[in-house]
Image (tube, grey):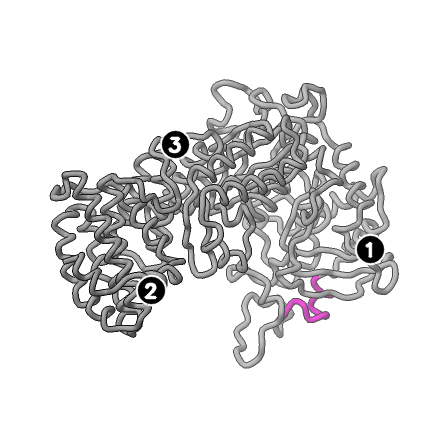
Amino acid sequence: MSWIQKLYETYEHCTGHEPEGFAPLMPICHTTQQAQIEIVLDVLGNFKRAAVIEKSQATTMIPCTETSAGRTGQKPTNHPLCDKLQYVAKDFVFYGGEVTSGFCKEPEAPHRAYLTALRDWAESEWPHPKLEAILAYVEKGAVVQDLVRAAILPAGEDDKLLKRWSNKQTPAPAIFNVIQNTQAPEDAFIRWRVESAPDDPLSATWQDKALITSWISYYQHTQTLFGICAVTGKESSLALQHPAKLRHAGDKAKLISANDSSGYTFRGKFLEAEEAVSVGFDVTQKAHNALRWLLAHQGYRKGDQAIVSWAVSGAQLPDPVKNSFDLLELDTSEVVESASSISTDQNFALRLKKAIAGYSTTLEPNEDVVVIGLDSATPGRMAISFYRELKGSDFLARVEAWHTRYAWHQNYGKETRFIGAPAPPDIAEAAYGRRLDEKLRNATVERLLPCVIDGWDIPLDLVRSVTRRATNRVGLDHWEWEKVLGIACALLKGYHTERNYQMSLELERKSRDYLYGRLLAIADSIEGYALSSTDEGKKRETTAGRLMQRFADHPFSTWRTIELALKPYETRMQAGSDKSVATLIKRRKLLDDVMSALDSLGDRTSDAPLSGEFLLGYHSQRKDFWPSADADKKAAENGSLSNTTNQNS
């Protein structure tokens, strides 16, 4: 139960000391609901006005009980203050409202239960003026009547509430714009305001701290089950049910669930659910509120999967599921600069160290850090799929090691070019495609988490899968191929740490695969440069690009085809401007150098397939061409095309 203990400690540390930009932690005995109608009363409980709530303002914190917080089924338990019309309105059925199926035989039961709970709270030792005003109004039994008169709820000629709006000639009432397509206006959720004066700034019940405290005190007083809490080791009131709504407002899955007395949740080993696990009511409420708060503000969520890392003290942490671009918080102005100035391993490492050092100023070395991954196979049960507890210094060191080990030039698009490591979700897409199944994506991200947090090697099957997709250039859109290529190079560099690959072009590396990769990049550059001045060239792939997959499988035989295809483009560049001539001189010299290096290996005629290393040579050589405009001009001044032609021949 260490996870719930860490969350409980986090709640205690952070309550009232939330980081800047974070919403306050939710108090215990409360939950959130999407409200559609707001009713405003005066302090005597008289109706003043009502309004339909915009969706952006709909999230409302309301008091709840353990049962109502996770209510499901045909007889949902009422909330104690704010709720749907079938609970708060005595005249709901009179106006044609339909209660949920479990109450059909006794349609007045939902309102009766709600009114009883409201009276018990108002008559307790913890009364409140707003509570008394709401009770006085609800007892009048005219909630729906007032909403119909205020034109909030539409009614037909028979005074029955309309289920649908069928009049296409006039705009539908505002209530239809805020409810779901499967709902009727009568399903609207009600929240309250009580004004002691016009424009009272403290009229909202969900913002009144005294009312919040009143409900917490009253509800804790009603607890009946007591025992030893497994988290604190102290005697306290025990939780009968545990909160849901962890990942989003509609999330029904629970981490702790033991309310299935007829199934196999605990039967067979225990007679009662509390024998399996006993957690204090206060502890589970605070722990789940802390987890919900963390996921909302600094967690990664994709489908049913959620991952979050945090320091128990509330100090800010780098997100282990982010790529280096987001981790270093680069902006669009730095993107252009990064392509030219941040071009070495040392510069990137320095920038990364500065970013990590920024976190270490607020995170103590021995401070507790937790990383947790959540997932659910069914709508009602959630599992902890990944869990690690680390010290602050270890966590920062491992995140830094991941971004250093797998750093490479990345091209995610026009405004997202950077040097650094890809994020686990990026790797999943690069390995299996953008349209990969959600379960496969989540499983891949889960496999990669130990690589980030524990320093494990990337699984070899992922490295091979990304390499294959990067080689199959024709099968991808250009922007997607650029992204996959950068990720493939990052994984190859990080997986083969013993080879000490550098992010810049390594002229001293004379391996066959690396040299062939450089050769392909040079051919690609020559044809691409010749085509760049024509509209045709902007749409057409180069010969080297089209034959990249074949080149990887049969490099020697494919190179002859590529080399012969270059001749027309070399002729075009030779007859072009001084700049194109200078570029051709430089590229031909490079071809000679690489060819000579291949000849010196003695296996140039081998047609054996290339390993993924050729992508590193290809990408590094291509990257080396980016800032070479000035170098091309100097080459034109120091050499002649005719001399280079004679050397190549």
Against 83, residue 646 (above or below) is below
Labels 2 & 1 near each other (Cβ < 8 A): no
The quadrant holding residue 290 is: top right
Q: Residue furthest bottom?
A: 169
What residue sits right under mark 1 in the picture?
Answer: 202
* Residue 572 x %, y %: 22, 71
Circle nearer the viewer, 2 or 1: 2
Part of the protein shown in magenta:
144-155
Q: Nearer the viewer, residue 54 or 599?
A: 599
Taking the magenta stretch, the answer to whether it contains residue 152 is yes
Circle nearer the viewer, 3 or 2: 2
* Nearer-N-terminus badge (3/1): 1
Q: Is residue 73 visible?
A: no
Q: Can residue 618 be seen in this view?
A: yes
What kind of residue is marked 1?
Leu
What residue sits right under mark 3 in the picture?
Answer: 457
Against 134, residue 124 (above or below) is above
The mark found on residue 637 in the picture is 2
